[in-house]
Image (cartoon, rainbow, N blue to C red):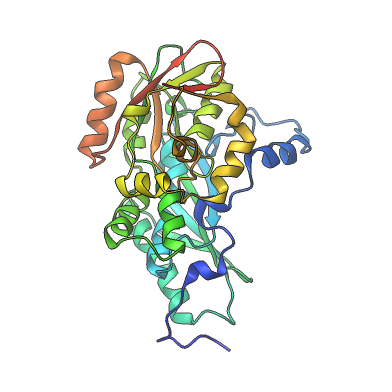
Amino acid sequence: MNTPADAPVRLTQFSHGGGCGCKIAPGVLTELLAATPMRALPRELLVGTESSDDAAVYRLNDTQALVATTDFFTPIVDDPYDFGRIAATNALSDIYAMGGTPIMALAIVGMPLGKLSLEVIQKILAGGESVCALAGIPIAGGHSIDVLEPIYGLVGLGLVHPDRVKRNDSAREGDVLILGKPLGVGILSAALKKGALSAEGYAQMIAATTQLNTPGIALGALPGVHAMTDVTGFGLAGHLLEICRGSGLGAELRFADLPVIEEARQWAARGTVTGASERNWTGYGSEIRLFEGAPAWLRALISDPQTSGGLLVACSADSGAAVLAEFRKQGFDAACRIGRMIAGQGVSVD
């Protein structure tokens, strides 16, 4: 029997792990993909699975390449409209992270029809459509199934000039690292699930997770931008490690410069973190070096899964000002320089 339309529904009660926190742990994912055969690939496939990048890129002609991605997850918030907005923003972020411009999307919908009213499901879909409208693209189709947990997301398609594709494995020694959004979304979601998140904290969480990473389009055109990715389920440390491994370099982060949502910092200091951050750390913590005396919550912060997180940019030092100016121009006030790429391996936090 369907839930009455006027009954309160907590979408997160259906989720064993919400948002990008329900991603398969990095170590397990690596093991799964290692067993997948790599067959002959077409020359036109500019980006595939070889570098754990944000999206696949296929050259169409000399001036256009297709950017294709898919992303979906279980609820990270209880409000259905906000859930739809967050999921859609997160999915389109992969296109922006490649330097691309979205052109259309397909909806991925899995809903427990016996537990959610049609009105609730309609609000989820409306939330996703509203974000696509902001991005200037249609939802041109999709697929839906009846499942035990609510699932929503998008297949995102975009275009980019082949010369402007921004991979995650092309950083250079001496590049500065710039992060577009503040950290702490996963921690806030953990507080929300406990019913302890403040109204202000929720508003900050929604503002961060529904802000489209549109600066990626302009950053794709900057020659000084060498590598780019978005920070999502594996946390800042995990996605930075992907840049390091692919580029054959190490990285230094400055603890004092990391942008953090203040309420998330407070919850982390009290021990409110996600289970996914611990799984992330288990997968890659041996490659991270923290400074002596680092607060206990720092580990949880840099491995915190960021649903619809910010762009992480590796660019030449003399391009840093232009990159920050583009972020500021598009309303990313928390964007800041957080470190640099160095010779070596792994990530150190000073």
Q: Is residue 152 above or below residue 216?
A: below
Locate residue 191, reporting x and y percent: 42, 57
Using the rendered image of the protein, determine whether residue 51 is visible from the camera's viewpoint: no
- Position above or below: 170 against 131: above
Residue sitting at x 49%, y 29%? 240
Quadrant that contains the C terminus: top left
Q: Is residue 309 left or right of residue 144?
A: left
User: In which quadrant is the N terminus drawn?
Assistant: bottom right
Looking at this view, is 157 or 52 the one in front?
52
Left or right, 273 with reference to 127: right
Q: Nearer the viewer, residue 269 or 5?
A: 269
Task: From the top left corner, tell me how far across and down residue 309 is, in percent.
Answer: 41, 44
Residue ID at (41%, 12%): 174
Decide if residue 320 is in sight here.
yes
The picture quadrant where one finds residue 219 is top left
The image shows residue 7 at horizontal and vertical percentages of: 43, 85
Residue depicted at 54% across the width and 44% down the height = 277
Q: Residue 253 is drawn in which quadrant?
A: top left
